[in-house]
Image (cartoon, helix red, strand yellow):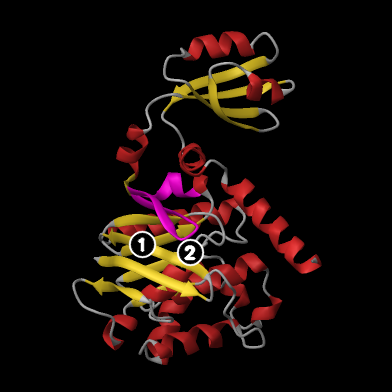
Amino acid sequence: MIEVKNLYKTFSTINAVNGVSFKVEPGKVFGLLGPNGAGKTTTIRMILNIIKPDTGEIYFDGNPFDRMIQNNIGYLPEERGLYRKNKLIHTILYFAGLKGISSREARKRALVWLERFNLTDYTNNKVEELSKGNQQKVQFIISVLHNPKYIILDEPFSGLDPVNQILLKDIIGELRKEGKILIFSTHQMEQAEKMCDDVCIINRGRVVLYGKLSEEKKKFGINTVLIEYEGDGSILERMGGVKRSAVYSNYAELEIDSDVKPRAIIHEASKYLDIRKFEVMEPTLNAIFLNLVGASVEEIERKDRETQVQEVTG
């Protein structure tokens, strides 16, 4: 188990992490979620002992961080961390050596993983000659080659096409069945909802939701209507009885008031749209996030980008 207790970290005047606490149990996928800039990566770096918390504690099966624990951690960073001029196989062997794996054993394991990810033909290519997706697969191989007990994956699906996303999901599922302690960090709520057993949503350094995913969804009630349609969906944002809405080109997710019946919403929407499909269900993670912070992940990130541009342009 990884246990994080009341972590705080401030950079200058920015409270990057503000009282974050959670537990990660073996054999489960733990989602550390939130938009970019929420404090996820700072929390991960404190878990990895890359930076120290101002206050708070971190335990691995009841023990503080030490070298033995360090060698039992697999970490896939969000940023590319490969030596671009080196050959793929030499890069893997180098990182395996840092974890105490002999060159002979590392090569044996690497060839198995390279075949699994359809990278065998690139064994002697330089890293810079690989696509972004293939570089991401190499980073994942490096993070698990030494068979770690604790695995931290920061945006692991970055750069992967749909086929390789499915492959990686299957592998993460296998690691889960092996009883690994898995932290999956992302700002993509749809990916997290499909994979995670437990979740911790962080926004602006604070925990806004933490617990078993299925139980947390029940707390928000079965008051979400999913609609697939043709037409101008903007009408859905102005309909009575709709508490919150996420409207896309031909799909909408509507959170309705507790005293409104879903069929009433569908009946009203059908006056303006060609309804192809609708479903009443528990709210999605994206809807829960919107409920908690009053904005979607995309809106938060857009506002942050606009603020950064304004600061640069003066």
Q: Nearer the viewer, residue 263 or 68?
A: 263
Asked whether 148 or 275 is in front, the reply is 275
Q: Give the extent of the magenta segment.
A: 191-210
Q: Which residue is mark 1?
A: 20
Q: Secondary structure at mark 1?
A: strand
Q: Residue at x 45, y 39 (%)?
A: 288
Q: Which of pointers 2 and 1 lies earlier in the amino acid sequence?
A: 1
Categorize mark 1 by other alpha carbons within 10 Å: few (<14), some (14-19), many (20+).
many
The answer to whether residue 139 is above or below residue 239 is: below
Which circle marks residue 5 in the picture? none
Q: Specify whether 84 is left or right of 218.
A: right
In the picture, measured across the screen, residue 266 lies left or right of residue 95, that is right
Left or right position of 155 against 55: right
Residue 181 image offset from top left, x and y in percent: 30, 64
Q: Is residue 198 magenta?
A: yes
Which residue is label 2 attached to? Answer: 39
Where is residue 223 shown, x and y percent of the image? Answer: 43, 24
SS type, badge 2: loop
Residue 24 lies in quadrant = bottom left
Residue 147: tell me if it is visible.
no
**Residue 249 placement (x, y as % from top left):** 70, 31
Pinpoint residue 55: horizontal percent, then vertical percent: 33, 74
Q: CA distance from mark 2 to mark 1?
A: 9 Å
Q: Is residue 279 above or below residue 89?
A: above
Q: Identity of the amino acid at label 2? A: Gly
> The disc labelled 1 sits on which kind of residue?
Val
Q: Are marks 2 and 1 in contact (CB under 8 Å)?
A: yes
Res. 123 visible in picture? yes
Quarter occupied by the C terminus: bottom right
- Residue 29 sits in which quadrant? bottom left
